[in-house]
Amino acid sequence: MTGLLKFLAVVDWLSEKSGQIGKWFALILVFAGSYEAIARHFFDAPTIWSYDTMCMAGGVIYMLGASYNYLHNAHTRVDIFYMQTSRRKQALIDVICSLVLFFPLMIIMFKLAVTWAAKAWRIHEVMFTSFWYPPAAPYRTVFAIGLFLLILQGIARFIRDLYFVIRGEEIA
């Protein structure tokens, strides 16, 4: 049991840290957007890098924040009926949805993201949405890492929910 508790603690710590790292990319996003707006409108000097930078920073925020949000139960859910059920039934619903929806979809997305990232590194892919052409591989790799962390947090949540369904008490 202590090994399981350590695993859950490590996964929670990773999710917490990924959220803390991801939030700093909001500053990059705001800086790039502000710089572009000022340069374009006041100095008639648009940049070639701000659009890609904002897109990449937004993607990093989203992907590194996914496991953090799952840890803190902050993902959007339709809870018209869910919130009116007991905690044990909620855990059972979460277990079923994890097995039927979450894990299959996240595993497929993770496999695609890893393939996408590996190909980007192999062919030295660049982003072609602007004339800056930044390398795509680091961005694509963050997507794979974010999905991996989300799957890990999903496993931790699944273990906690299954334990609650069986025992009727929280594990950790």
Image (cartoon, rainbow, N blue to C red):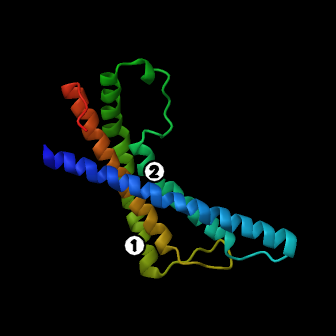
| In the foreground, 145 or 37 | 37
Q: Looking at the picture, does residue 160 appear above or below residue 108?
A: above
Q: Which quadrant of the figure has residue 82?
A: top left
Q: Secondary structure at mark 2?
A: helix
Q: Residue at x 68, y 79 (%)?
A: 131
Left or right: 114 in relation to 11: right
Residue 38 to residue 92: above or below:
below
Q: Are marks 2 and 1 in contact (CB under 8 Å)?
A: no
Q: How many marks?
A: 2
Q: At label 2, which amino acid type do we have? A: Ala
Q: Which mark is residue 118?
A: 1
Q: Residue furthest left?
A: 1
Which label is found at residue 64?
A: none
Position of residue 17 measured from the top left corner of the image (x, y, whole percent): 40, 57
Residue occupying the point 53% across, 62% down: 24
Circle 1 packing at 10 Å, graded few (<14), some (14-19), many (20+), is some
Q: For mark 1, give the secondary structure.
A: helix
The residue located at (49%, 34%) in the rendering is 77
Q: How far apart are labels 2 and 1 at the CA level?
A: 22 Å
Classify residue 163 as left or right of residue 123: left
Image quarter in which the N terminus is found: top left
Q: Amino acid at mark 1?
A: Ala
Q: Of callouts 2 and 1, which one flags the residue occurring earlier in the amino acid sequence?
A: 2
Image coordinates for residue 161, horizontal then vertical, percent: 28, 34
User: Dot 2: few (<14), some (14–19), or many (≥20) neighbours within 10 Å?
Assistant: many
**Residue at screen point 46% across, 75% down:** 120
- Whether 123 is drawn above or below 169: the answer is below
Q: Is residue 161 visible?
A: yes
Q: Which residue is more in the foreground, 53 or 117? A: 53
Residue 157 locus on image (x, y percent): 31, 41
Q: Residue 37: where, in percent of width, then height?
A: 78, 66
Residue position marked by numbered label 2 in the rendering: 66
